[in-house]
Image (tube, rainbow, N blue to C red):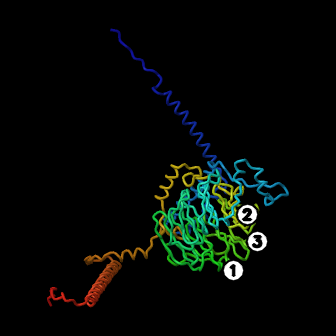
Amino acid sequence: MDEIKVEKSEKKPFEHKFKKFNKSFQKHKRFNNKYRLQAKELDDKQIKKYQRGDVSVHRGKIRTSFFKHKFLRQEQKFNFASKHSARAEILLNEGEGFIIPDEGEETIEYTQDDIKKNVDITSASKSFNLNLDFGPYNLNYTRNGRHLVIGGKKGHIAAFDWISKKLYCEFNVMEEVVDVKWLHLETMFAVAQKKWVHFYDNKGTEIHCVKKMNDVNQLEFLPYHFLLVSGDDKGWLKWLDVSIGEMVAEFPSLDDKITIMRQNPSNAVTCIASAKGVVSMWAPANHRQTLARILCHPAPLTALAFNVDGTKMVTAGMDKKVKLWDTRMFQNPVAQYHLNSTVHNITISQKNVMAVAMGEVCEIFRNINVDEVDSYTKYLRHIELSPIKSLQFVPYEDVMGIGSKNGFSSILVPGSGEANFDTLEQNPFRTKLQRREHEVKLLLEKIPAELITLDTSQIVNVDVDRMEERFEAKPEVHIPITKLNERKKARSGVEKSKIKQKQHAEEKQHLLKAAKQEELREKKKHKKSQKSDKEESNVLDRFKKKSKK
């Protein structure tokens, strides 16, 4: 038989595949290096926008190397987070657009008709007027900015989708309506009527009537805590948990009558503006004790508002002044403005555009320089035919709603709304299934009312007083004390002193426990003797067993 020769090929197996892989890898590597070089080029303004103050610490004052490394790592984490947040701006496709006037013109000269002529059809359709005869009207938008509920003083209530103009319900309660508020979803809203607070669904059906909340003037809803807060004529504050239908807390405030009440979105603290010019802050856990009190104006307060992140507070008083405060330190106002007349209502948009109502006139101010807080200038002006009752900017839209005596008006305010929205937080275009899932998620992530504090960093700390109360409330268990056997030869006098200190401490604890147990026994004996004295003699007592002496 012929021998079969197997010739070895010079090419290695799978060599062509490795070459292709190497080529593709080199391409990806070049792309990543290019992207990294582009990502490193960031402006200081962009990074400063996402920084939370100066986090640097003087390391020379820190003694140990452990804490030096700890603070160094903390600074690196903060800088890393701010840089990556600035880089993520590439994903935000939309941006706010303010009005840029021509030379020799000012934006305050432009009317709503001028703005409508220069915008697209869909934006122009968002500006409209509703002439109604049951005013003055209060209004409230949902958190996603899609739905609106209005309530007239003469009992008229209407809920509708203000973008598509689809009416959900419209009815008259035949009594005075003081305030209206949406709850956690657009399926339910609360109405403060003449006597009590009533709950309705979006079909107009009354679900519940809360008679514990009577003579209410103001309503506020805390979405992350499922709490409805009310302030009444007698100065009482009440927190109702709408998820379980129970009253969390109720107590009187320091004011005789609550007429102005707002919530701080950052920490859910309820703030009340009084006729003494003082803003007081309250939480349901602190019974009858204010978290803070700030003297804002020498005259009675007429309006109060917070921005979206809760870092700025705006107050207005009878002295015709508007003051801007930093909620992180209430030392002095950051800025103050003097107006021609008294301000009766204030609201702030998501982009820190401020609107004030003075009778029939609504003036809108814009913050030109983001870095400077006190750079507000006049932006637009709108005049209604009747006195303005309520104002609110629409979330994620360049629109503002105005409730007046003659009805409701929706006006365009370019640059007031957030252009990019997070669908996991709020989605204006969510479906019925997404709404249900969102409700379940909110219930699972519900924050207890006890965690409402002025300083949110206190949640990390341990409440020592409550912990001691819980330990004292537990049943006492007798634990035998084991005496420490001293060493025959201690190394030094320090060890002997430590052993003696431990022994003295254990003896003190033992004596305190024994004293407490004796007090409890005496109390029990005293109670038994009182019961025996109270028991009256009866004819059938002779059949009882006599106790042996």
Q: Which residue is mark 2?
A: 365
Residue 327 shows in the view: yes
> Is 422 on the left-hand or right-hand side of 403?
left
Lower sequence index among marks 1 and 3? 1
Considering every residue shown, the one lying at the far right of the view is 104
In terms of secondary structure, where does tag 2 sit?
strand
Residue density around tag 2, few if under 14, some if 14–19, many if 20 or more, within 10 Å: some
Q: Which residue is mark 3?
A: 339
Residue type marked 2: Phe
Residue type marked 3: Leu
- Residue in the foreground of this view, choosing between 307 and 221: 221
In terms of secondary structure, where does tag 1 sit?
loop
Residue 27, quarter of picture: top right
Q: Are marks 1 and 3 in contact (CB under 8 Å)?
A: no
> Is 456 on the left-hand or right-hand side of 340?
left
Q: Position of residue 481 (x, y in %)?
A: 26, 78
Lower sequence index among marks 3 and 2? 3
Residues under labels 1 and 2: Cα distance?
Answer: 24 Å
Quadrant that contains the N terminus: top left
Q: Are marks 3 and 2 in contact (CB under 8 Å)?
A: no
Residue type marked 1: Pro
- Residue in the foreground of this view, choosing between 131 and 51: 131
Q: Which residue is mark 1?
A: 298
Residue 203, quarter of picture: bottom right
Residue 488 shows in the view: no
Q: Position of residue 536 (x, y in %)?
A: 25, 90
